[in-house]
Image (cartoon, rainbow, N blue to C red):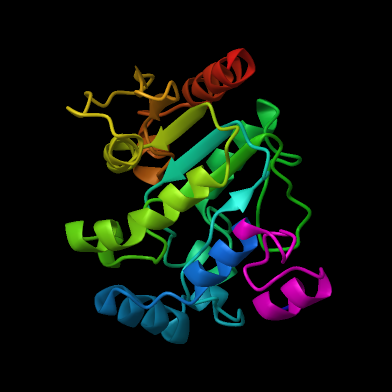
Amino acid sequence: MAVHERAEAEGLIEGATGLDPGTELAALERRVIGCRRCPRLVEWRERVAREKRASFAADDYWGRPVPGFGDPCARVYVLGLAPAAHGGNRTGRVFTGDRSGDWLYASMHRTGFASQPTSEYVGDGLRLLGAFVGASVRCAPPANRPTPAERDNCLPYAAEELRLLPHVRAVLCLGAFAWDCAARLLGVRPKPRFAHGAEHTAPDGRVMLGTFHPSQQNTFTGKLTEEMLDAVFARARELASAG
């Protein structure tokens, strides 16, 4: 079934995250989906959606910015880099349909933040429990490398998500890029050093947590293991419970 057909069948709004259409989060989602601020990213995401990967040739690619996804009452905000060209850019949901997402949601399931360990397509039953997942940049970038200007154009969307998620106590950063962006979002200066398991408390009391990104480069080489990722999510739960 095509992305848009699945979303319609599930009764979801256009971004297919299951939000009440009348909420501010849903209004933000609609603004994200319609964004065309960065010409290079618009051209790339739409070209990927037209040309497709051979293994997904029958899929109807999303090919637009990918909004955040999760629990409106979240106490943990997970911040990634950007949608994968053939992951979120294909499915329309962040960290869905790619290997990084397989690792992320499996860990979130093991630590009680996700209703199931896999995320293959919108409407597959995945629900996040006490967590919300967003991205620093909402369009798939060439070579997975957004420019500083593209980051600055897009980061206000994450800032707005955090404003609309008032219960968030921990921001879990997937990789150094997200760590840098979280420091900008939370007004942390000078930027603290990134490391797996790093923690830093922002002026408002929210805590930045760092983990290596669950990319194939890190998971295939053993730089990031399931136990390492689970430990960071377990720590996020501790911080969320204490806040």
> Is residue 2 at all visible to an observer of this figure?
no
**For residue 15, above or below residue 157:** below
Q: Position of residue 40 (x, y in %)?
A: 25, 76
Quarter of the figure with the C terminus: top right
* Left or right position of 11 against 192: right
Residue in the picture at 69% in, 42% down: 128
**For residue 184, above or below residue 137:** above
In the image, residue 14 lies in the stretch drawn in magenta: yes
Q: Position of residue 221 (x, y in %)?
A: 35, 34
Residue in the picture at 37% in, 83% down: 47
Residue in the picture at 28% in, 74% down: 38
In the image, residue 17 lies in the stretch drawn in magenta: yes
How many numbered discs? 0
Farthest bottom residue?
Answer: 50
Where, by quadrant of the figure, is residue 234 drawn?
Answer: top right
* Left or right position of 190 against 168: left
Magenta: main secondary structure:
loop
Choose between 218 and 2: the one closer to the eye: 2
Residue in the picture at 30% in, 58% down: 144
Q: Position of residue 1 (x, y in %)?
A: 74, 78
Please state the extent of the stretch shown in magenta in the rendering.
2-24
* Left or right position of 104 against 225: right
Q: Position of residue 196 (x, y in %)?
A: 35, 23
> Is residue 5 at all visible to an observer of this figure?
yes
* Left or right position of 90 against 124: left
